[in-house]
Image: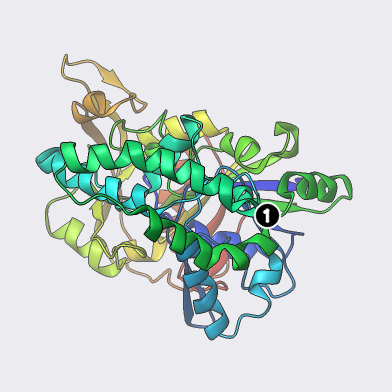
Amino acid sequence: MAQNIVVIGSQWGDEGKGKIVDWLAEQTGGVVRFQGGHNAGHTLVVGGKKTILRLIPSGILHETLNCYIGSGVVLSPEALFGEIDELLAAGVQNVEQRLKIAPTCPLILPYHIALDQAREISRGAGKIGTTGRGIGPAYEDKVARRSVRAGDLADLDKVAAKVKTNLALYNVQLQHLHGVEPVDFDEVMAKIRSFRERLLPMLHDVAGTLYQKHQNGERLLFEGAQGTLLDIDYGTYPFVTSSNCVAGAASVGAGVPSQMLDYVLGIVKAYTTRVGSGPFPTELFDDIGAGLAERGHEFGSVTGRPRRCGWFDAAALKRSIQINGITGMCITKLDVMDGMKEVKICTGYTLPDGSQTDILPFGADAVAGCTPVYETLPGWDEPTFGVKDYQHLPENAKRYLKRIEEVCGAPVAMISTGPDREETIVVHHPFA
C-alpha cells in the first residue's frame, strides 16, 4: 500500500496534473509543491467552477487540508498574494493559515523579471519560450549562492545588503548587454517591505513537518510542475524549464528522504502537446492538429499561449517512465479524441543515419533529427466524455489505452474523461 504519491508530468507539461492532485488530495494529510515557480498553471474544475493555481498546491480547495511549498520552488511574493486574494474572493477559507512555506525558498524579485524579459527579447529567433516571470534568473541566483531567501526577510539589513550586491551585477547586464533601464534599489526594497509582514507568518519548517506526518502514518501528495521533457537535465535542452521536474526532485525540493516516495503517478495526455519553442517530433500542422487544439482548449492556463498538438509519442513517454520510475499512468483528455476515424501512436523514430530507436534521445539537436514511426489504430465514435466506469468506454478506446500500456511498459491506473473532479475512471487506485 502506498503511503505517499509523487504526481509528475510525463510529457512537455500541461497534462492535467492539477485535477488529479485535487482528486487525490482529500485522502491525504497534505499536498506539497516541490519545484518550479508561477510559470506553471494548474486548472481545477469542481462542480463546473474553474480555479487556476500557479504556486499554491492543488489541494488548497479542500478546506481542512494544509498545503506546503518546499525549497525547490522559487517564490514570487506578488504572484503568491495575488493568487491567495483570488482564492479568498472565491470563498476559499483560511488560505494563509493553511499554506506553509519553507524559509529556504528563494524569492523572485524585480531584477529577475527584468533580466528574464530582456534576455528573451535579445535571443530573437532563438528564443527559448520562457514566460518572462523571472524563474530562470532566480534559479541562477540560488546556484550562485546569492539568493534572497524567504527566511532572510526577518533581517531587512541583511536583505538590503544582498539586493545591493545583486543589483550591481544585474544592472550592468541590463544596461550594457540589453540596453534597458536599470532596476532601482529603493523600488526593490519598497516592494520587499510591502509583502514582508504578510509573508513572514507563513514560513514554516516544511521538511520537519512532512517527516513527522510520515512517521505518524499520514499520507502525503507531492505535486510537480511542468513535465519531464522540460526537465533542466533530461529534457530537450536548452528548450527546457529551469528546474528538475522529475520524480526524484520531490525528495530534494520538499526536503524528505527518498524512502518516503512510494508511488510515482505519471500524468499523460492522450495525445501530445508542447508550449513554446523546441523540437516536437509528432507535431501536426494539419486539420487533425487544429482539431485537437480546438476540442482540447489547448491554450496555456498561465500565459494563454496556444499549445502545439501532435500524436501520442510513446517513445518519448518510455524515456519519461525510465527516468521517473513511473508506477502507474493517468491518461487525461481521452474525450478530446472522440469521433476521430483513426488514431496514431509514435512507437519510435528513424534517425538521420537511417537507424531506428524506440526511446527519445537527450537534447534538442538529437530530438530535432527524429522522424516518428507510427502505428495506426481505429478510432471511436461513441463518446467517452464524463464516463466514470472503464467497462463503459468504447472498445476501440480501450484498445488504444491497452496499446499505450504495451508499448510504454507501464500500467494505466486512472483515466480522466473530462475537466471536472468527478469525471475520472479509477482502474487501480494509487493509494490501494
Q: Is residue 130 left or right of residue 75?
A: left
Viewer-side residue, 16 vs 88: 88
- Label tally: 1
Q: Is residue 270 left or right of residue 63?
A: left
Q: In the image, residue 361 lies at what x, y percent?
A: 33, 24
Decide: few, some or many residues near mark 1? Use Cα within 10 Å; few <14, some 14-19, many ≥20.
few
Report the colour scheme.
rainbow
Residue type at mark 1 is His
Q: Specify the quadrant that holds the N terminus.
A: top right
Viewer-side residue, 138 vs 10: 138
Q: In the image, residue 290 lies at what x, y percent?
A: 17, 61
Q: In the image, residue 332 lies at what x, y percent?
A: 45, 58
Q: In the image, residue 152 lies at what x, y percent?
A: 61, 48
Viewer-side residue, 246 vs 378: 246
Tell me: residue 243, above or below residue 18: above
Tell me: residue 190, above or below residue 344: below
Residue at the (42%, 54%) spot, across then down? 15
Residue at the (73%, 44%) spot, across then down? 207
- Is residue 103 among the parts visible in the rendering? yes
- Is residue 392 among the parts visible in the rendering? no
Residue at the (44%, 37%) spot, across then down? 141
Res 167 quadrant in image:
top left
At mark 1, the secondary structure is loop
Residue at the (42%, 52%) spot, across then down? 109
Q: Is residue 333 left or right of residue 282?
A: right
Viewer-side residue, 224 vs 419: 224
Residue farthest along the right direction in this orientation: 216
Q: Which residue is mark 1?
A: 429
